[in-house]
Amino acid sequence: MFYRQNFQELDKSTQDSAMLLYIQAHRRLPELKEVCGRDTAHGKSRLSTSDPTQYRQGIGYYFSDIKVCRSFFFFIHDIGLRRFTNLMHHFDTYGTLQRVHKSTGKTPNRKTVLSVANIENIVHFIREYATKHAIPLPGRMAKFKNYKVVLLPASKNKRVVHSEYQESLKIVAEEEVKQAGCSTAAGAVPLKSVAYKTFAKLWLKYVPFIVTSKPASDLYSTCCDLTRKIVRAMRRGEEARKHAVGNLQFHLADAAKQRAYYNEWRMKAKTKTTCQLHDDDIEESSFEVLSFDFADRVSYPSSARPTGSEYFESPCRCDIFGVHNERSRMQTNYLIDEANSIGKGANVIVSMLHNYLQNVKADYLVLFANGRPICGMEC
């Protein structure tokens, strides 16, 4: 078994060279008939056709100088019948020279090769999809060393993104046909549909920092609690498990609605300055979309010139409360020293929001706390 594992560790060219040398040593050659007669070193060469000049070119299978069956020989060398037969044909033509693939050094000229435009379109779609659905890495996680990593929801895995990409291609093709007024747009390069395997390879090669979060990496407290309840319900029976799974599915659907509502207002803030807030409104009103939340507590040196290990041993802590304007893409941060901190309750949030809203001029405000809608109020 160790021999098989060692042989598997060799690269393919080295394996081929070893097998070609074995074939040279144990192959039954018809040229030996004139020297040794009909009997060769490993037995008789039998007739393969009616032509007496044609002989079957067999080979003996040996391992550690012990004759073995063909199945065991193929298993111990991790090789199949087709590959071994190709090596024997190569030996008859070229001897023990190393095999070279016929496409080596040639530029691929296949219809399945993706163009640069197709690859750029796929990468652009993944980036835009992550902009809409992904969130930045929440702090430091053990498996992600790159701080640029963004996490897609667990429900948006690569297969879901690939299916949505396929749907977007159909929509784009239909729009091009309508604009051109014919079956194909004149002068346009059609975008090819790719299989999931190719889509995943391009994702890993060009945008590896966009990662689908695993259910175990969900940091939201409600999701963690519902997941624990599902694990505990496995011991209580099928009904308890179905009830726990239903609660989690309801929570995920509700979170998806909130996320869609947030993205809708965020896109409005980017493209419009006024809109009709209600169906019965006659005039459009100006509005602002604000997102606010507390960030992780930050530590910094307590002195401007600490000496030695005091730089790490006696840091001060600072709370950060941020308010982000979705239209201007500017964020205002409130820094609260630990000596002045009174917690993260409602009074603290209302006080800082009141200070921020004194400088906001709009007829209507839409507030989101950590991506979840809180209220819409008129100024």
Image: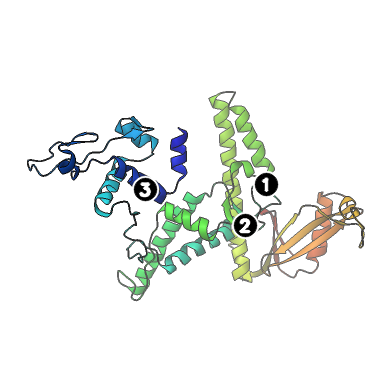
Q: Secondary structure at mark 2?
A: helix
Tell me the quarter of the image containing the C terminus: bottom right
Mark 1 or mark 3, which is nearer the start of the sequence?
3
Percent x, y of residue 14: 41, 49
Residue type beneath disc 3: Asp
Q: Which-is-in-front pick, marks 2 and 1?
A: 1
Q: Secondary structure at mark 3?
A: helix
Q: From this view, report whether residue 63 is shown above or below residue 31.
A: above
| Mark 3 burial class by Cα count in 10 Å: few <14, some 14-19, many 20+ | some
Q: From this view, report whether residue 96 is shown above or below residue 80.
A: below
Say which of 367 and 161 sits in front.
161
Q: Secondary structure at mark 1?
A: loop
Percent x, y of residue 178: 36, 70
Q: Which residue is mark 1?
A: 142
Q: Is residue 126 left or right of residue 170?
A: right
Q: Is residue 338 left or right of residue 238?
A: right
Mark 1 or mark 2, which is nearer the start of the sequence?
1
- Identify the residue shown where x is 61% and y is 70%: 272
Q: Which label was assigned to residue 14?
A: none
Q: Which label was assigned to residue 16?
A: 3
Q: Which-is-in-front pick, marks 3 and 2?
A: 3
| Mark 2 burial class by Cα count in 10 Å: few <14, some 14-19, many 20+ | many
Q: Which residue is mark 2?
A: 262
- Identify the residue shown where x is 13% and y is 39%: 48
Q: Which-is-in-front pick, marks 3 and 1?
A: 3
Mark 2 or mark 3, which is nearer the start of the sequence?
3
Q: From this view, report whether residue 155 is shown above or below residue 378.
A: above
Residue type beneath disc 1: Ala
Q: Quadrant of residue 59?
A: top left
Asked if the residues shown at circle 2 and circle 1 are in contact, with their CB atoms under 8 angstroms apart, the answer is: no
